[in-house]
Amino acid sequence: MTEHPEIAHLRELMEEKFNSLSKANDLAYIELQRRLDTLNHAHQNMLSDRADFLRIDTHNRFYQEFTVWKDTINRQVSNIQGRATATVTIVGFVFAILQLVIHFWK
């Protein structure tokens, strides 16, 4: 039995529509997989970046210890500078007195 031409045409249109929908679903699936892959890489990158950062409690503990160390060094440097200044001043006075003594000794 032969099909009516209009029914055959409608059947072809329906088959074309189902093929198009199938192709669209395949493309949507491929795009979804691509996006999921991108998100997985972004998540892995975030985790590796997070490993490079200090936690706030670690930073605060380091900063407190560093501040104590820095203050100790600053005090030691100030003491050394004060002693060096005193030594240079005394040596300068000694040489000035020696020059005066030598000048008036003649």
Image (cartoon, rainbow, N blue to C red):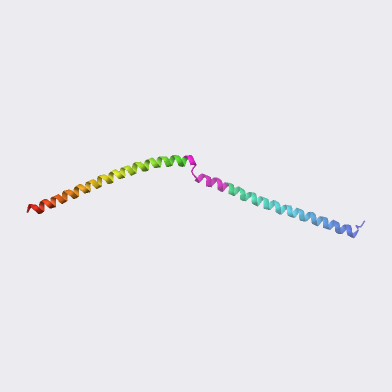
Is residue 53 one of those drawn in magenta? yes
x, y percentage for residue 32?
67, 50
Report the predominant secondary structure element of the magenta stretch: helix
Pick whichever, 3 or 1, lies toward us.
Answer: 3
Residue located farthest toward the right when viewing the structure as drawn? 1
- The quadrant of the rendering that contains the C terminus is bottom left
x, y percentage for residue 53?
50, 45
x, y percentage for residue 61?
44, 39
Left-right relation of 17 to 72? right
Is residue 73 one of those drawn in magenta? no
x, y percentage for residue 23?
74, 55
Left-right relation of 40 to 96? right
Q: Which residue is depicted at the point 16% across and 48% down?
A: 94
Left-right relation of 10 to 82? right
Q: Which residue is depicted at the point 19% across and 50% down?
A: 92
Left-right relation of 101 to 44? left
- The quadrant of the rendering that contains the N terminus is bottom right
Q: Which residue is depicted at the point 86% across and 57% down?
A: 10
What is the span of residues highlighted in magenta in the rendered image?
Answer: 44-57
Q: Quadrant of residue 5?
A: bottom right
Q: Which residue is depicted at the point 36% across and 42% down?
A: 71
Asked if 15 appears above or below 59 in the picture, the reply is below
Q: How many marks?
A: 0
